[in-house]
Amino acid sequence: MRKWTDPRIARLITLIRAALRPPAGAGRVALALTFGVLCHALFAVGVLAMIVAMFFGLSESLGSVPWPLAALANAALIVQFPLVHSVLLTGRGGRLLARLIPGPHGQTLATTTYAIIASAQLLALFALWTPSGIVWWRAEGVAFFAMTTAYAASWLILLKASFDAGAEVQSGALGWMSLLARIRPVFPDMPTSGLFRLIRQPIYVAFTLTLWTPPVWTPDQLVLAVSLTAYCLLAPRLKERRFAARYGTRFDGYRAKVPYILPRMTKTKDQPDAQ
């Protein structure tokens, strides 16, 4: 590793590192609250941007990249979300998250940091999208009411699924609240209740439903829906590998009883009980 010989540069690096090191005591509380506010504000803005942008079929957004370069820019916006989202859930990704915050609290804040990054990704995707300007279909009358109802219901199902999976993890609250309480983050148990009694991946299914129920359809919305639907079908496989490694035979039993994404039409007596 290269060593700086100039004492002024070495001193500057030392000062920067000291400034970035989170303080103890009151500083810990300030750090936790700062991350909490940032996390939930970004989460709210990112989700709101997605709800509004898809409601209009991505026909309204802030992106202004000239065509045909806009196609590449939009493709990059689509790819960055599932790519980074999945990489950060790996072992190496988790270690990277812990190192993003200098000092002793990086590991505790990892889930909050992850939620901040994911929210920023969502905001970038839907706020910076460059619309094609083409509208294929815009629901009107009864069709508008039906599609809007389905769209709202899809978001409510996603909210319910996120709550069943552990709201503190899904929202990023686990990290900053654990730091505030000076405790080690404790992840919720393997979800098997609520919507998880019907299918193993209700979050991904609900997310997919939001992609296909907007009342306005454009080429933009179709490309987004197809791309992220493919992600929603494949990404849970990686998640289930992690669950199999973490919970072992318990997850194997759950997987044998509960279908992947399509619920059974009739209730079977061997479904897991709610916990």
Image (tube, rainbow, N blue to C red):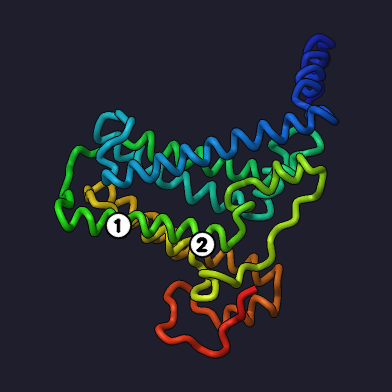
Query: From the viewer's perspective, is residue 72 above or below residue 210?
Result: above
Amino acid at the residue labelled 1:
Thr
Circles 1 and 2: CB distance less than 8 Å? Answer: no
Circle nearer the N terminus (1, 2): 1
Q: Give the residue drawn at x 71%, y 58%.
A: 187
- Counting from the top left corner in percent of width and height, residue 55 is at 30, 46
Query: From the viewer's perspective, is residue 137 above or below residue 103?
Result: below
Which SS class for mark 1? helix
Q: Nearer the viewer, residue 37 or 6?
A: 37
Q: Nearer the viewer, residue 108 or 223?
A: 108
Query: From the viewer's perspective, is residue 37 above or below residue 219?
Result: above
Q: Quadrant of the N terminus?
A: top right
Amino acid at the residue labelled 2:
Ala
Q: Nearer the viewer, residue 150 or 57?
A: 150
Q: Give the residue drawn at x 44%, y 77%.
A: 263
Q: Give the residue drawn at x 69%, y 80%.
A: 249
Q: Which residue reaches farthest bottom? A: 269
Q: Give the residue drawn at x 30%, y 28%.
A: 64
Residue tagged 2: 161
- Counting from the top left corner in percent of width and height, residue 193 is at 59, 71
Q: Nearer the viewer, mark 1 or mark 2?
A: 1
Answer few, some or many: residues within 10 Å of disc 2's Cα (few below 14, many 20 plus, some between 14 and 19).
many
Answer few, some or many: residues within 10 Å of disc 1's Cα (few below 14, many 20 plus, some between 14 and 19).
some
Give the Cα separation between the discs numbered 1 and 2.
18 Å
Which SS class for mark 2? helix
Residue tagged 1: 149
Q: Along the horizontal axis of the image, is 125 left or right of 194?
A: left
Q: Quadrant of the C terminus?
A: bottom right
